[in-house]
Image (cartoon, rainbow, N blue to C red):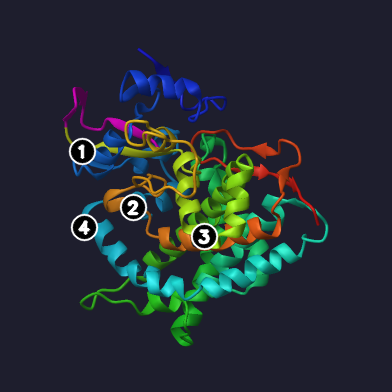
Amino acid sequence: MTYFDLSDPAFDVTSPTVHEARDESWYVETNWGWAVLRHAEVSALLRDRRFRQGNARWPAQNGIHSGMFSDWWQETLLSLEGDDHARIRRLLMPAFRNKTIAAMRPRFQALADELIDGFAERGTVEFVSEFAEPYAARIICVLLGLPEDNWHQVAQWADDLGASFSIDVGNQVPRIEAALTGLYSYVEEVVADRRAHPRDDLVTTLVQATDDGDRLSEHELGVALVFLAFAGMETTRNQLGLALQTLLAHPDQWRLLGERPELGENAVEEVMRVNPTVTWVTREALEDVDFQGLHIPKGGIVQTLSHSAGTDPAAMPDPAFDITQQRPPHHGFGAGVHHCLGHFVARTDMAVALPLLARRMPDAVPDGPGEWLPVSGNTGALRFPIRFTP
C-alpha cells in the first residue's frame, strides 16, 4: 500500500507519484490520516456532515496546547463548528455579498494598472514583491478601509501569521503571536473609529450587521478581522504567483488571456484546479464513518488533495490546462458549510489582475527558477522574477 509523508518538505502533492496512487485507489494512508485523491470522493467528503473542519486540532497536533495563537486559532471561522460557526458566518455574510465586491472592480483595476506602470518600462519584474504582495495587501486595506500606505505593515503581519499553516508551525509561535498582537491592536482602533464615524466599508458593515438583534461582539469582530486580513492577503498573493507560473508555462493561453480579458474568471478557476495554493483541505470524523470500503474511526483525519482531485481523469476526461474549458467545480476554496467566505473577493481581484498582466506583458517568461514554498500545505512563490519586452 502506498504511503505519503505529508510533513516532508520534499513531498510534492502534484507529483506523478500522487497521480499513480490515484490510478490505484481513491485514498492512501499518510502520517496525518488518509489522503483522498479523486474528485468524486473529495466532493462527497467535504460536504459530509459526519465530518467537521479538521483544522481545530492543528496547533495541538504540533505540540501547541495553550497561549495566544492556540486560543485565536480555536475561535477562527476555520475551527468553529455547528451553531457557533453558522452564527458567525451569518453575521459576516453582508460584507461579502457579490454586489458589494463587484462594485470594487474598477478600484482593483486601477490598482493593478498602477502597479504594472511601476515596472512596465523596465522589462523585468520580481513578481511577488512588486505585484502579487502589494496588490493583495492593498486590496485588504481597501476592504477594511485602512490607509493603503500601511500595506507594508499589514503584509508583514499577514506573512508572519501565514506561518500558522507551515509544517514547521511548532517553531514559529513567537513570530505568529507578535503578528497577532500587532494586528489585533490595529483592528481594534479601526473598529472603534467606525463605531464613532461610520463609512462605506466592510468594517462599518460588520459593526452594524445584526441578525434578529444578534450582533458580533467586539472580541468576535477582532478575531474575524484579524483572520480576514491574514487569509485574504496570503492566499491571494500565493495564488497569483502560482497563476503566473502556470500561465507562463502555457504561452498560447497567456496570449489568449491578454487578447480576451473576458476569460479572466475562467482562467482563475482553471489555475486553481491545476495549481492551488491550498493543496489540501482537512476534515475530522465526528463519529465512526464507513465510506466506500474505508473505516474512519471517530477523530480520524482525512486530507482531501485539491490538485489530485482537480486533475482526476475520471471527472475530466481531458485534464490538460485550458482557460476556455468549463470544468466540474474545483476544491481550491473548500466545499460544504466551510466553503471559503471570501471566495468572491479572491475570484474578482484575480480575474481583474491576470488579463491586465497578460495584455501588458504578452511575451513574459520566467527569468530563472525563482524561489518556492514546498508543494504541500499552503504553497506559493517567495520570489518569481519575470522578463518581457518593455
Q: Nearer the viewer, mark 3 or mark 2?
A: 3
Q: Label 1 amino acid? A: Leu
Q: Label 4 amino acid? A: Asp
Q: Measuring from the top left, give residue 148's x and y in whole percent.
A: 63, 71
Task: Indicate which disc, 1 or 3, sits on the residue closer to the N terminus.
Answer: 1
Q: CA distance from mark 1 to mark 4?
A: 15 Å
Residue identified by numbered label 1: 286
Residue identified by numbered label 4: 83
Image-quadrant location for residue 315: top left
Residue identified by numbered label 2: 339
- Relative horizontal placement of residue 66, taking residue 160 as reference (left or right): left
Task: Indicate which disc, 1 or 4, sits on the residue closer to the N terminus.
Answer: 4
Task: Indicate which disc, 2 or 1, sits on the residue closer to the N terminus.
Answer: 1
Q: Measuring from the top left, give residue 336's x and y in whole percent.
A: 27, 49
Task: Indicate which disc, 2 or 4, sits on the residue closer to the N terminus.
Answer: 4
**Is the residue marked by circle 1 packed among few (<14), some (14-19), or many (20+) residues within 10 Å?**
some
Q: CA distance from mark 2 to mark 1?
A: 18 Å
Residue depicted at 64% across the width and 44% down the height: 251
Q: CA distance from mark 1 to mark 3?
A: 37 Å
Task: Indicate which disc, 3 or 2, sits on the residue closer to the N terminus.
Answer: 2
Q: Secondary structure at mark 4?
A: helix
- Relative horizontal placement of residue 37, taking residue 131 as reference (left or right): left
**Magenta-highlighted residues:** 288-305
Vertical position of residue 84 compared to residue 96: above or below: above
Residue depicted at 21% across the width and 31% down the height: 298
Q: Label 2 amino acid? A: His
Q: Secondary structure at mark 2?
A: loop
Residue identified by numbered label 3: 351
